[in-house]
Structures are given as C-alpha cells and as structure tokens.
Image (cartoon, grey):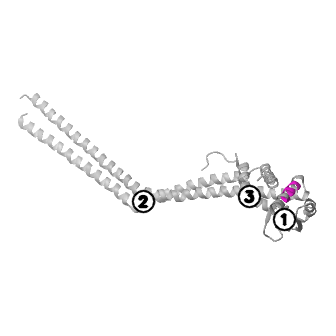
C-alpha cells in the first residue's frame, strides 16, 4: 500500500460520484420528458372533448335524477285525496255564493 | 504511513464518495418530483381556465333545463288538481242552483239587490235581467217591487243574474259563471293554499 494506491482510490471514488451525477441528470431528463407528456396530453383537444363528454354524461345522469324527483313530487300532488278536492270545491262554492269577495 | 492507516483513509474516501453520490441522487429525485408536480399544477390551471367555463355552461344548460322542466311539471300538476277542484265546484254550484238551496236563493236575492242598486237611477227607464229559465219565476217574485221597470230574459247560465240597463249603458254581471271568472285568480290562490299545504315534503329545489 502506498500514497499512489490512495490516489487511485480517490480517482475511483470521484468516478463513482461522477456516475451518480450522470444518473441524476438522467432522472431529471426523464422527469422533464414526463412533464412534457403531461402538458401535451392537456393540450390535446381530443382529451378535452372526451372530458367534457364524460362530464356531460354525468350531468345527464344528475338531470335524470332531478327529473325523477320532480316526477315523484308531481305524482304526490296529483294523488291528493278526493276529500281535499271536495273541501276545496266547497270553499269555491261558498266564496262564489257569499258575495264576500 | 502504516497499511492500517492507508486502509482507514481509503474507507473514508469511499464513505464521503457514497455520501455525496447519495446526496446528488436524492436531490435529483426531489427535483424530478418538483418538475412533475409543477407540470401537473399547470395542467390543472390550464384545465380550469379552458374546460371549467365550458363545464359551467354545460351544467347550466343540462341541470338548468332539468330544474326548469321539473318546475313546469309541478306547476302543471298543481294546475290539474286546482282545475279538478273548480270542475267539482261547478258541479256543486249547478246542484245548488237546480235545487234552489237556501244559499243559492240568498245569493240570487243579493245579486239582484246589488244589480238594481247599481243600475237604477233617474235616467234608467228599464232594466233587463238575464237568468236561467228555472230561476225566472223566482227572480220575478224578487223584483216585483223594484223601483224600475223590469224585463226578464232567459239565458243559458248556470245561475245568478246578469243585469243590463235597457239602453245598454250600464251592466252588472253576477251570474255564477261571471262570479267564478271574476274570482278565479283569488280563489286559485286560496284553493292552492288549502290543497298543497303539507302535500310537499322538504328538500324542494
């Protein structure tokens, strides 16, 4: 063992660090490529149209649900008992004949 | 320098090299994550600025239409029920008039009193009273002491009277049909309050 061997070892270690730097560059380059891919996908009109179409489909389902709720309410209204209609008719008769209004 | 010392130095050289390499890789991973996160954030921003307004328009169009159609459906259902009540009321009024019930006769009398009070005057020589054929005798008996000359005419009304001055300048409508027509708006509201109070639950849009 000698100083020369130490210098050699130092050189190897520097190359090891240099190798890590290269790998780091590759990692960053891959990340940049991935970022560009993400951005390209967003710029893609087809993807935007697809997203809007999917959103519209969800809205249609929501609209169907709303309509079902309203339909059920309308049915409840139409199913008012005859006695109540009779009561309302009597009220009309009373008002028409009373001259109070 | 002993071989142990040299060995120790070598280990130190490699320990530092590994530490440095690890640090470089850790920083690179962190930078890569930052780059991708930044891209995603920009994508979201872009999407928000480009797609969100279109989504909002879609929502207004699709959901807005559903709500407005639904509300129309409710209004139509209510109108249908209110109309049923009015149809039933007309049947009842017809029966009241045909049977000459006490309420109907009182109504007829008050109608005539008000009509004559409104139409009579120094410039009125004669009034024409239109009534259902079945009421003519009853009306005649009610106006026998009228302060003005009276002519009776039959009319295809359910009941009540329509009274006009013979010269056509003054008129008073108090047939059942004209009362119904005149009161319909007010009555619709009263009837709706009576019919729909408590019919609809919570969670209305």
Marks 3,2: beta carbons within 8 A? no
Query: Are the residues flagged by discs 2 and 1 from a single subunit?
Result: no
Residue carrying label 3: B184
Q: Chain of mark 2?
A: A
For the N terminus of chain A, the quadrant is top left
Residue carrying label 1: B157
Judge by depth and name the residue closer to the eye, A73 or B160.
Answer: B160
Residue carrying label 2: A48
Judge by depth and name the residue closer to the eye, B7 or B27.
Answer: B27
Judge by depth and name the residue closer to the eye, B45 or B196.
Answer: B196
Q: Which residue is rendered at x = 37% and y = 53% of the image?
A: B45
Q: Is residue B109 magenta?
A: yes
Main secondary structure found in the magenta portion = helix
- Residue numbers of the magenta segment: B105-112
Disc 3 on helix, strand or loop?
helix
**Left or right: B23 as drawn, with respect to B178:** left
Disc 1 on helix, strand or loop?
loop
Marks 2,1: beta carbons within 8 A? no
| Viewer-nearest of discs 3 and 2 | 3
Q: Is residue B66 magenta?
A: no
Q: Is residue B147 above or below residue A11?
A: below
């Amino acid at each position: 063992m000698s100083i020369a061997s130490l210098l050699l070892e130092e050189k190897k270690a520097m190359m090891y660090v240099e190798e890590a730097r290269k790998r780091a560059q590759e990692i960053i380059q891959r990340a940049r490529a991935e970022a560009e891919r993400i951005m390209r996908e967003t710029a893609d009109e087809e993807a935007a149209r697809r997203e809007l179409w999917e959103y519209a489909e969800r809205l249609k389902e929501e609209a169907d649900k709303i309509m079902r709720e309203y339909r059920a309410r309308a049915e409840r209204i139409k199913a008012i008992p005859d006695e109540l209609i009779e009561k309302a008719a009597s009220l009309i008769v009373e008002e028409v004949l009373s001259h109070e209004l | 320098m002993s071989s142990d010392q040299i060995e120790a130095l070598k280990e130190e050289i490699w320990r530092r090299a590994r530490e440095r390499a690890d640090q470089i890789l850790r920083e690179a991973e962190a930078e890569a994550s930052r780059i991708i996160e930044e891209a995603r954030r920009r994508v979201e921003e872009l999407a928000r600025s480009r797609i969100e307004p279109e989504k909002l328009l879609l929502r207004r169009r699709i959901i807005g239409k559903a709500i407005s159609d639904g509300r129309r459906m409710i209004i139509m259902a209510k109108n249908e029920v209110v109309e049923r009540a009015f149809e039933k009321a007309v049947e009842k009024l017809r029966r009241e008039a045909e049977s000459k019930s006490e309420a109907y006769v009182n109504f007829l009398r008050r109608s005539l009193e008000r009509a004559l009070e409104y139409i009579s005057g120094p410039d009125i020589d004669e009034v024409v009273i239109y009534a259902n054929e079945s009421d003519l005798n009853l009306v005649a008996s009610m106006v026998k002491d009228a302060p003005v000359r009276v002519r009776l005419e039959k009319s295809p009304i359910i009941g009540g009277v329509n009274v006009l001055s013979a010269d056509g300048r003054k008129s008073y409508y108090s047939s059942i049909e004209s009362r119904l027509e005149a009161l319909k708006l007010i009555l619709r509201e009263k009837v709706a309050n009576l019919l729909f109070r408590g019919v609809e639950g919570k969670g209305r849009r």
